[in-house]
Image (cartoon, helix red, strand yellow):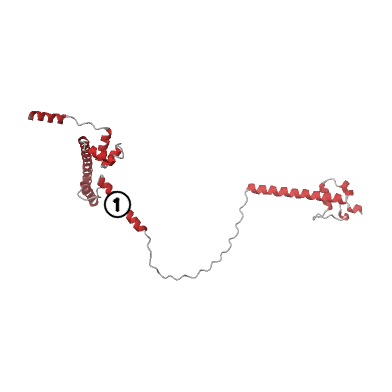
C-alpha cells in the first residue's frame, strides 16, 4: 500500500503543471505587478461586470496562484539582482572617493547604499491592490476637504468707515487731431490727374460760356470767332463782357 502511494506521489510530481490560457497568463502577470484582482481580471479581458468574482475564482485555482507566486518571486529576484549591481557600483565609488579624500562624495555614496539596502527609510512604499486604492481615495477626500475650506469666504468684522467726499472730475484736455498720413505715390499721382482733369473741364466750360454769351449778345462777331478760345479775349477774369473799345481790334472800330 505504501509502495503504491509513493508511486502515485512520484507520478504527480513528475507531471508538468497545466498550461495557462492566454487570459489566465495575463491575469497572473497583472496580479504579480501589484494590480488588484478585479482590475487584473478586467485587463485580462474577462467580463467587466463580473470581474470581481472572476478574480477571486482565478486566484483559488492552484495553477493560477502558483503562476502568480512564480512571477512575483522572479520579479523580486530581478529587483534584488539590480539592487546588488547598484550597491556594488556605489561601493566602488565610495572606495574611490575615500582614496581621493573626497569626504562629501564618500558620505553621499554611503547614504545611497544605506537607502538601497533599506537601512535608512526612504519615501514611503506604496501598497498594492485594494489598500492602495483606499489610501488614494482617502487622500483625494482630504484634498477636496481642504480645498472647500479654503474656498469659504472670510467675513471680516463690521468697521465704521465714513464715506469720502466725491472727487472732482479732472479736466480732460482734448486730444490733438491726428496728422494726416502721407499719400502713397500711386495716390498722389491719381490725385494730380484728377486735379488736372477738373481744371481742363473748367476751362472748357468757361470757353463755352464765353462763346455762347458773346454770340448771343453780338452775333455780328461770329465771322471773327474761329475757335472757342477766341471768345475769351472779349471777357475779363470774372467772365464779364468787356466794353467794345477793349475788344480785339477795338481801336480800328473807333
SS under mark 1: helix
Task: Give the residue at the far right of this rendering.
Answer: 254
Q: Residue at x 70, y 50 (%)?
A: 195
Q: Is residue 129 left or right of residue 200?
A: left
Q: Residue at x 26, y 47 (%)?
A: 132
| Nearer to me, 173 or 140 | 140
Q: Give the answer, above or below, for where 56 lies relative to 111.
A: above
Would residue 101 be seen by someone viewing this image from the given angle?
no
Q: Quadrant of the C terminus?
A: bottom right
Q: Residue at x 11, y 28 (%)?
A: 7
Snapshot quadrant of residue 161: bottom left
The spot of residue 222 in percent (x, y) is 87, 47
| Nearer to me, 174 or 57 | 57
Would residue 24 be seen by someone viewing this image from the given angle?
yes
Q: Residues within 10 Å of mark 1 (few under 14, many from 20)?
A: few
Q: Give the answer, above or below, for where 91 lies relative to 145.
A: above
Q: Is residue 154 left or right of residue 65?
A: right
The spot of residue 53 in percent (x, y) is 26, 40
Q: Which residue is mark 1?
A: 139
| Nearer to me, 46 or 12 | 46
Amino acid at each position: 500500500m505504501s509502495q503504491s502511494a509513493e508511486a502515485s506521489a512520484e507520478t504527480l510530481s513528475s507531471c508538468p503543471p497545466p498550461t495557462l490560457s492566454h487570459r489566465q497568463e495575463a491575469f497572473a502577470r497583472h496580479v504579480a505587478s501589484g494590480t488588484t484582482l478585479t482590475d487584473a481580471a478586467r485587463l485580462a479581458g474577462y467580463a467587466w461586470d463580473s470581474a470581481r468574482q472572476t478574480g477571486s475564482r482565478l486566484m483559488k485555482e492552484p495553477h493560477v496562484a502558483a503562476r502568480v507566486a512564480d512571477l512575483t518571486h522572479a520579479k523580486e529576484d530581478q529587483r534584488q539582482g539590480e539592487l546588488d549591481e547598484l550597491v556594488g557600483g556605489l561601493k566602488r565609488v565610495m572606495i574611490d572617493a575615500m582614496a581621493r579624500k573626497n569626504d562629501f562624495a564618500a558620505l553621499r555614496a554611503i547614504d545611497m547604499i544605506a537607502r538601497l539596502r533599506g537601512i535608512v527609510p526612504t519615501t514611503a512604499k506604496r501598497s498594492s491592490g485594494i489598500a492602495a486604492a483606499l489610501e488614494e481615495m482617502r487622500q483625494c477626500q482630504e484634498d477636496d476637504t481642504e480645498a472647500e475650506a479654503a474656498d469659504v469666504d472670510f467675513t471680516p468684522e463690521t468697521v465704521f468707515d465714513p464715506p469720502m467726499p466725491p472727487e472732482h472730475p479732472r479736466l480732460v484736455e482734448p486730444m490733438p487731431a491726428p496728422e494726416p498720413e502721407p499719400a502713397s505715390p500711386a495716390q498722389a499721382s491719381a490725385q494730380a490727374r484728377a486735379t488736372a482733369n477738373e481744371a481742363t473741364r473748367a476751362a472748357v466750360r468757361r470757353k463755352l460760356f464765353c462763346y455762347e454769351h458773346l454770340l448771343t449778345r453780338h452775333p455780328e462777331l461770329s465771322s471773327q470767332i474761329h475757335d472757342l478760345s477766341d471768345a475769351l479775349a472779349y471777357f475779363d477774369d470774372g467772365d464779364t463782357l468787356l466794353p467794345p473799345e477793349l475788344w480785339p481790334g477795338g481801336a480800328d472800330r473807333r
